Amino acid sequence: MKLKKIASLLLAGVMAASMLAGCQNTSVNPDPTPNPAPSTGYSDMVGKNLAPDAASKVDMVDSTDLDDALKSAMSYVAGSSIASAYNWNLISTLKCVNWGTNFVSNDEMLEAALADMIDSMDAENAVSAAINTTFDVLDPYVNTDAERRDDDRNITLMYVIDGKVGYDSVMKQVASQLSHEILALKTDYRVAGTNTVLDYNYDVSVSADTITLDADHGKSVTVVAVNVARILGEG
């Protein structure tokens, strides 16, 4: 009888030891952390906020060339530019930068950034603060040079806004400013006196970056680059 009890105790001890070893070797997986949603890029963010008729006229595509052009241009955006823009009226409304009639007093650095970006993208911006005048570069009825109608062309725009504004809001404002101009883009052009019809497709790319001045009360600026490329299709 005693032997049976001893055997039972030994068996119980072995089982307990096995269970303890199992617990030591078994890890309990915590709840899995969901992977962040894949980034679709700023181009897609803007495209989703375009007016429906405008969105149907263009293809929204990310561009590494535009990303590189913006990176180069940002080297011109010094602290004085950010502070000046912030102090004047760079609050929450998106502003378009262009030569001559900027919203910021004497802000040559932002103009230099725009010029660098345009040069990097081999763009053909009109020298005007009006967005519609810049878009006229792509209009075959405004730019009647035959050699330029029958070719690819592109323009590059630069916007700035307070860096504290969320990117969702920024891209909605970009889409709002672009929708009207995109709606006016011509998708075809009939060459006078001929049966030739030129077809145009459009790619729109968007890139963005933010600079914050840690030493100047956290003033910041988000710079948004937009490139609109007119691509000659088959007539």
Image: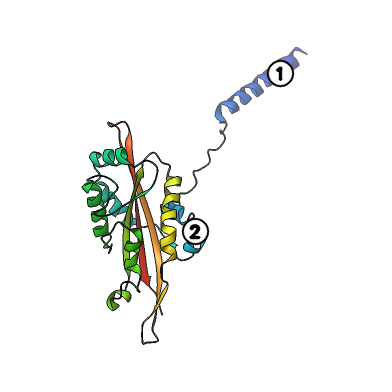
Q: Horizontally, is 33 left or right of 119 in the view?
A: right
**CA distance separating discs 1 and 2:** 82 Å
Between 117 and 135, the residue placed more toward the observer is 135
* Quarter residue 92 falls in: top left
Q: Which residue is mark 1?
A: 7
Q: Is residue 82 above or below residue 141?
A: above
Between 193 and 188, the residue placed more toward the observer is 193
Q: Which residue is mark 2?
A: 51
Q: Is residue 58 above or below residue 163?
A: below
Say what secondary structure mark 1 lies in: helix
Circle 2: residue type: Ala
Badge 2: residue crowd in 10 Å (few <14, some 14–19, many ≥20):
some
Between 92 and 216, the residue placed more toward the observer is 92
Question: Residue 65: percent from the left, percent from the top?
Answer: 31, 57
* Quarter residue 105 falls in: top left
Question: Residue 113: percent from the left, percent from the top?
Answer: 25, 51
Residue at x 30% of width, y 47% of height: 103
Badge 1: residue crowd in 10 Å (few <14, some 14–19, many ≥20):
few
* Quarter residue 64 falls in: bottom left
Instruction: Kindly tell me whether residue 60 is visible in this rendering.
Output: no
